[in-house]
Amino acid sequence: MKDSNSIKIFSPATVANVACGFDILGFALDNPGDEIQVSIKDSPGISVLNQTKDTVFPADVNKNTAVVSLQAYLSHLGSDQGFEITFTKKIKPGSGIGSSSASAAASVFAANELLGNPISKENLVQFAMQGEKAACGVAHADNVAPALLGGFVLVRSYDPLDIISIPYPEELYCTIIHPQIEVKTEDARKILRQGISLKDAVKQWGNVGGLIAGLMKGDYALIGRSLEDAIIEPIRSILIPGYDAVKEAALEAGALGCCISGSGPSMFALSRSAEEANQIAAAMKKAFTHYEIDNIDYVSKVNNQGPKVI
Ligand code: HSE
């Protein structure tokens, strides 16, 4: 729904890191996603309305990722245009599937549409990254870039920002299991080691290259072999009760690979069809029952568009 003063959009959840690509790889999902309405105001300033049940927003509006991103965008344009943002969030904060980035991507995308698209979608990424910085202390782009562009995205470089869309097989499906515990990205980053061994770096480089090649060639076996993380998974998986058993269940049910989605606690698994993805979801849920943790699952194709007007 769009008129000259208001726009309602769907903004997709995203899977960052994709096992081997910490802070440099991500992809977008068709399901779940947030609904966000952005309207032009007569007076300057950004106001926020929350229509989400059970989700409390930061009292300080300057900690809201959508507001911070929109402020960065407007200041780049030298504009004092006021906006009102109304959220109906379906992606839970602290879930590991890009809740803060869906909000950040949505606000800049919507405002840009309302102002006649003065900036390309690719160039909106830098503003949405400022929202991530407000949320977790680091302006990482591996959620906001796929949230804005859709598909698989590689952040080849942060300085200067160089974002590459990677072709991928049409049939690729993703299963997400979200155990109902909250992991803050900021906390999940604090526990990481600052140094890595050359041996682990060599493994990781091989897998990043393998994953990109596998996606581009539609080589599922290569995609599967490359969905390995020698560096982050061994540390962060400790935060997810039952992680090893749930991952094993996904692989036994036919997943190409399975790992932590973003900073967790959600886990993702890739597969070749909706049927396989549903079987994998059932197997992962069954494995979680031994750990008595409530969980929600999503089965989705890779989203190829980013935000869309609804
Ligand atoms: N690359 C980020 C991290 C993604 O792993 O901390 C957070 O969703």
Image (spheres, helix red, strand yellow):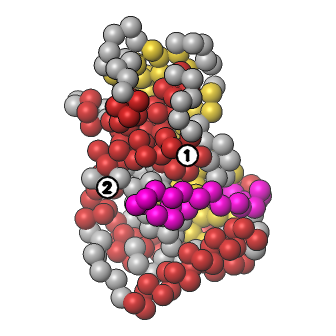
Under mark 1, the amino acid is Glu
Q: Is residue 282 visible?
A: no
Residue 168 located within the stretch drawn in magenta: yes
Range of magenta residues: 154-178
Marks 1 and 2 sit apart, C-alpha to C-alpha, by: 19 Å
Quadrant of image for the C terminus: top right
Q: Residue at x 62, y 19 (%)?
A: 1
| Residue 276: in magenta span | no
Residue 175 is left or right of residue 123, and the answer is: right
Residue at the image point whose x is 68% and y is 47% from the top: 304
Q: Nearer the viewer, mark 1 or mark 2?
A: 1
In the drawing, what numbered circle is on residue 122?
1
The image quarter containing residue 254 is bottom right
Q: How many marks?
A: 2
Closer to the camera in the image, 43 or 31: 43
For residue 292, above or below residue 217: above
Determine whether, in the image, residue 292 is placed left or right of residue 209.
Answer: left
Residue drawn at (43%, 91%), measured in percent from left and top?
A: 199
Q: Who's the residue at 27% across and 53% down the image? A: 137
The disc label shown at residue 138, or none:
2
Q: Secondary structure at mark 1?
A: helix
